[in-house]
Amino acid sequence: MRFAVVLHLYYEDQWPEFSAALESINDTFGLFVSLGPHSDFEGEIRRTFPDAVVSCVPNVGRDVAPFLAWLPNLQKFDAVCKIHTKRNDAGHIGWRRSLVNGLLGSADTVRVYVDAFEQEPDLVLAGPSMNYVDGDAHIYHSRRALTLQHGELPAGWGFFAGTMFWCRPSFFISLKDDYPQDIFVAHGDSEGHPEHVIERAFGLMARCADKKIMLGGDHPTIARASQLRGNLDWSERYLGFKADPAEETSVAQAEGVAPSLVQLYEQQSGHPSEKWSGSLKQYERICRGVRDRKVKLLEIGVRNGGSLEVWSRYFPSGRFFVGCDIDPKCAEIRFDDDRIKVVTADAAAPFAKTLIMSICGQFDIIIDDGSHRADEIMRAFLQFFPALAEGGVYIVDGVNLAEFSAEEGGPMQPTSSLAFFRTIADVLARSTSSDPTDAAHRLAPFVRDHDLEIDVALFRTILSIEFAGSLVVLRKAAAHEIGPGTRMRRGSASADWDAETLQSLGQDSTAFPSPSPAVLLPAAIFVSAVVCFKNGSANLPDAILSIQKQSRPVYEIIVIDDGSVAHEAEWLQYFAKDAGFKLLRQDAAGSSAARNFGIRAASGTHVCFVDQDDILLPQHGEAFVDHWRSISSRLDRLGWIFSDYRLIDENQTVTSSAVLPHSADPIPATLDAMLGRELHMASANTFIDRAAFLSVGGFDERLCGFEFDDLFLRLFIHGYGTDFFPHALADRRNLGGLASQGASVLDSTEAFFVKWLGHRFDNPEEQKLCRTNLKARILRSLQARLGQGLVDDDEAFWSLFEKLEAAK
């Protein structure tokens, strides 16, 4: 009889409690532990359980998503005990301990469960009887999802509240495919999320197959699921776990648990601060899931500075706590914690964003507790929500104060800030509407009354809106969370979803098309920054920091390691965790292959390529996006745009403020002109439509040195237009070499020349002119390299030179 324990250890401070329970098991067992995405706790686990299988997982789907991911690995076990941590507050302490004790409380307890699974082949689920609850009485917001996935719900089914139990993993393996990983998201405490559905699905599946369930306790019971009845009022049982505040505080202190936000405010002795206790409890609920993270927080409204001090204590691992206030006196406030920074500016003014973003780039939490004026609330939101990181939260505090201000027109004002957020919620709810004017019509009054400029790309990135007392809480979607996803249908046909009904709706009975895209999506621009890396630890931090400090934040950062040596690859692994970018690896194949790899993994609509020795100027993304939008209105197929750039030395001193020699006539109008001119198009000074890039096949991976010229020639031939932004938007280090080379520059030069010399042109006249211009250009390029002392292999250089001169 083989069994295992699966533990999701999100709250690592609870490890001693779980370790003690595991050490009480006398039999040999497998141990699988999932940790938070950036955890370094694996070593601590292996000190006690060296053979444990440990994995860091995304903070989505709570304990359920990791368990489903483990299921294929668990098929070799006859029984598995699923347990997980719960936060140290209210009834969760008592509930957690009761569950763990009921499942792993002693060696005898474990033996009872293991023996039951060995003796009862039809036993698929087991747990403490006190936690087995009636399914219909506790289905809440999960009914529709369960019905669609598992068919009509049977009478008399139940499940183990808290999702801690023993189970037979072979019976539940289908859950991995029924509920794929991409449906899970990070969220607060609200019901109806996939993990709540799956919590009930374990018991429902046992009931649908009428398998056996064991209710453990002093007098264990094993029976068919149809014969069991769960507790009808779990809330009464749950309330029995709740500790009084004094007990909760003493437990927290005894276990070294950090004080709550309310407790921190009660203890505040530095700069004064004022918050409503009800709001503090909402903040606690919203933020406690990321309390151990290296968060970056922006608070609009500094006043006396006490709130920033409290936040810095609430997030002990936080990196920056930036306050913004229009009152110049706030600049005089002094803080002992150097992580706290204050910017004195009107948060609704564009230059405030530039000042703030220069400190730390994107934020994980943004709180607007400033003027409480409706127009300033809206302007600040439109300006700073794009600066929120994926999965981040934007909180507007005191929105009710604006509603009752005479200056704002009272609570019935149709374009108040509260009405604005309600309208956004309505727009998102109606995002599949077939009427393309609906969203514009609904937002028009706010644009008119408050002179707003609304970037429609913003709405696509809103995952959810919540109204909680005086707070409005908006969450930023991660890339995989944008859009409705795949419509799923599982289970047998029912009266609600029979083929005839679906046919009447114009839908096939087996295939559910995704809803129409939101009416605001066509103008959306999401920029993916794709960075090539190879043994570049000396320069990459500057490049990444320049991306993170963009006045218009990028949608994602993807770094591709092109076969770095071991110590550089190890450094990059740690840097990726700290800086928060997506890391991809490939064997050394060259910068062109690396960029192709990166853009295939990107999810943005547009791409900017960055080499490890590039530095983007702060307005890089904003200028490119604004220019793109202004040009796209008059060009049908805009494929790419480019700018000038500056050269800098190793000390970042500008050695050339403008590189492009054809700034008065930057865009060649014909193919022969493009072939005959040094285009000076490189990574950081170009901005490309991802779909256009993919449509022409991406970079030619044989090239390293002419890959951008070759790409833009193919875009030109395929009918894509371009335009030039007449200012430098990036700095390039003049180091005399490329960041990542898979072939020598001479080999690349020859490959580029041979490729376009043999191109099939439209007519003989064009062919002759193009070949003549191409030959002259490549010869000039070689002569320039010779003059700059960049020739390492004289024999190879002169051999290529002679080939070019002889070419016709």
Image: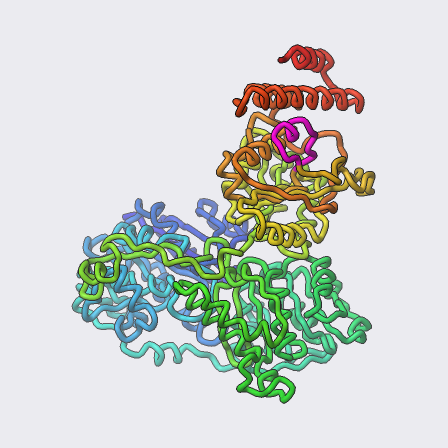
Identify whether 519 is placed above or below 573.
Answer: below
Colour mapping used in the image: rainbow
Q: Quadrant of the C terminus?
A: top right
Q: Nearer the viewer, residue 375 or 34?
A: 375
Q: Nearer the viewer, residue 770 or 183?
A: 770
Q: Give the side of residue 709 with respect to residue 352, left or right.
A: left
- Picture coordinates of residue 438, whole percent (x, y): 45, 68
Q: Give the side of residue 476 with respect to residue 124, left or right.
A: right
Q: Taking the image as drawn, is residue 16 in sight?
A: no
Q: Give the side of residue 392 with respect to residue 30, left or right.
A: right
Q: Taking the image as drawn, is residue 556 in sight?
A: yes
Task: Determine the residue positioned at 59% across, 23% down.
Answer: 766
Q: Nearer the viewer, residue 332 or 127?
A: 332
Q: Nearer the viewer, residue 460 or 241?
A: 460
Task: Determine the residue positioned at 32% across, 62% down.
Answer: 109
Please name the predominant secondary structure of the magenta segment in the image.
loop
